[in-house]
Image (cartoon, grey):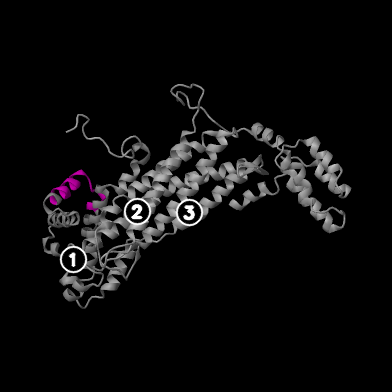
Amino acid sequence: MSPLGHQPLSPLDGRYREATASLGEYFSEAALNRARVRVEIEWLITLCHEGVAGSTPLPAKTIAALRKTVADFGPEDIAQIAHFEATTKHDVKAVEYYVRDVLAAHGMESLQELVHFGCTSEDINNVSYALVTRDALTSVWLPAFSSVLNRLTELAKSWREVPMLARTHGQPATPTTFGKELAVFASRLARVSERITHAPFLAKFSGATGTFSAHVVAEPAVNWPIVSKNFVEGLGLTWNPLTTQIESHDGAAELFGAISHANRILHNLATDMWTYISIGYLTQIPEPGATGSSTMPHKINPIRFENAEANLEISSALFDSLGASLVTSRLQRDLTDSTTQRNIGVAFGHSLLALTNLHKGLHEVSLDEKALLADLHSNWEVLAEAIQTVIRAEIVRGNSASSDPYATVKELTRGRAVDADVLIAFVAQLDVSDGAKQSLSALTPEDYVGLASALVDYLD
């Protein structure tokens, strides 16, 4: 053994464990085995309810006792399954043997042969993965995502009136408001959130090649598709009737694609927030005792957004790979999905870590309104768009004989900074009505934000 002992290989289980530990409740090997035990027990309960092989419906007290096995699943159960797997070299078979022992402990030896009845391992696995992924999404990832979205919405509304110089292609452009720009991200995230929230979790339960062959031979009188459908839907999943040995993972690929899309929107948010900090629009609130640089004491690095940026890239790469790999299986089955699916929790973990940092980062910044105003007043040339558009309207109204308003204003402003005095003098000599001149002369960069503030209302 190494002098270091057993150390975590992944930073998700090491340095960042505090932020990602909650996912272990769903994506650890122990959590997966607990889900498998649940599926095996619920299938046994279903078979008895249907009277398969002469069985009779289990009493409510017995059902409650069996389900308590899942609720109380802990270290001893984990160890027992590991003991079986050491011999079987097969994880699902180990779970089957464990459940048979559970029945024996409850005096139900006569029903042991109904454990895993008609099942292939993939019947147990695909339902189990659907359950743990759904539960992790709804209990951990979506709440973290919603916290970021809610904070972003809060800031968008709070800063909706604060004018800001926009930058298209990195150059000064028509002003906006800081809140409206955050509202754009909030709107994008809300839209993709709908896809994620309503994603179906597909599952199959139809035997070795998806044909119910063994089921029909053993119990030809049972309507197996209906039993399978009711079983899957009873677990809160969506039944897939047409599969090979495996559920085709198309639903999972759609979900992973949507989360990857959300990651990329969040990545765009992180890089923009980093840039706003870089140019002085946002200031970071110092954390007592924290160090920004090992050599430059003055620094407060935008680490929350940088950490989020990197982890979102890793998460999206994993989700993209999962979605691409899982939808292909040779003929009726190969095992590529088996090892691939074990990384679902890793993909969620990097995204959760990013969400945690974004949430903290969005609470650790303040807006320097003076810096925004100073930048606006250094770029009066952004009013060129307004001037040439007013001239166009004046021509249509018959109030001006000017030609090519765009070229007229371009000659004054393109590639050069223009201050208020130069712009007002330029407006004074324009061939437009006095009303138009008065309106343009009164216009300032901070006033030239259109309906930016009102657009934030579309978040509601």
- For the question of whether residue 430 can be seen, the reply is yes
Distance from label 2 to label 1 (Cα)? Answer: 25 Å
Distance from label 3 to label 2 (Cα)? Answer: 16 Å
Determine crowd level at label 3: few under 14, some 14-19, many 20+ residues with C-alpha closer than 10 A. many
Q: What residue type is labelled 2?
A: Thr
117 left or right, relative to 352: left
Tell me which segment is drawn in magenta.
68-84
Q: Is the magenta stretch mostly helix, strand or loop?
A: helix
- Mark 3 — residue? 193
- Mark 1 — residue? 117
The disc at residue 133 is 2
234 left or right, relative to 150: left
Q: Residue at x 19, y 32 (%)?
A: 2
Q: Residue at x 16, y 33 (%)?
A: 1
Q: Which amino acid does label 3 sit on?
A: Ser
Q: Residue at x 37, y 48 (%)?
A: 348
Helix, strand or loop at disc 1?
loop
Helix, strand or loop at disc 2?
helix
Distance from label 1 to label 3 (Cα)? Answer: 39 Å
